Amino acid sequence: MVCLGNICRSPLAEGILQDKALKSGYQWKVESAGTGNWHVGEPPHPLSIKVAALHGIDIGHQRARQFVKEDFKRNDFIYVMDSSNYSTVKQISGSFWEDQKIELLMNELYPGENRNVPDPWFGNEDGYHTVFTMLNSACENIIKKHSSKTL
Ligand code: 4NP
């Protein structure tokens, strides 16, 4: 799960998908990163921690890190929050880039529409709730898609 700062959106996405995977009995290792390095080593934004906790998900242990090209090798799949993340990941990854391994997360909910997950960084708490709802629905579809494949 990749966003810009790795403190607002992608930590929530990591927490949500990891929680759903565990509850579905899938041994997935979900992680997140940011394309920028401003917040490396920091915990998620307090409002991301709060909104996750309201849904029973603890993301307080996460620490921000920057996306590195090796993430393409180490992960089976990469979801980005917006089109700007997509472009920056492409720049960072160079020859490690694999088209079939990366997708805008919201395309799991609205296939082919290339919608972005809005950045709540400059807004108030409402934005974090909106983002949670969007991420939760997209992650639910990832789980559903996987379970229909493994039936
Ligand atoms: P995120 O939000 O990409 O969802 O983690 C942001 C967090 C910090 C900044 C930008 C976006 N920043 O400019 O520091």
Image (tube, rainbow, N blue to C red):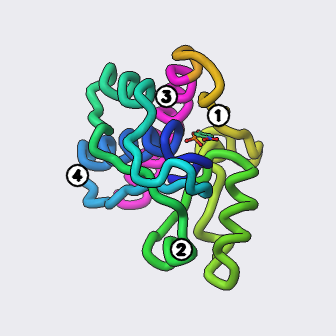
Is residue 150 highlighted in magenta? Answer: yes
Q: How many marks?
A: 4
Q: Position of residue 1 (x, y in %)?
A: 50, 53
First of labels 1, 4 by sequence position: 4
Magenta residues, start to end: 128-151
Which mark is on residue 25? 4
Relative to 57, is 133 on the left or the right? Answer: right
Q: Quadrant of the C terminus?
A: bottom left
**Magenta-colored segment: predominant secondary structure:** helix
Q: Position of residue 122 (x, y in %)?
A: 65, 26
Distance from label 2 to label 3 (Cα)?
25 Å
First of labels 4, 3 by sequence position: 4
Ligand 1: does it lie within 8 Å of the C-beta at label 1?
A: yes
Distance from label 1 to label 2 (Cα)?
24 Å
Which mark is on residue 132? 3
Residue kind at label 4, given as amino acid type: Gly
Is residue 58 highlighted in magenta? Answer: no
SS class, disc 1: loop
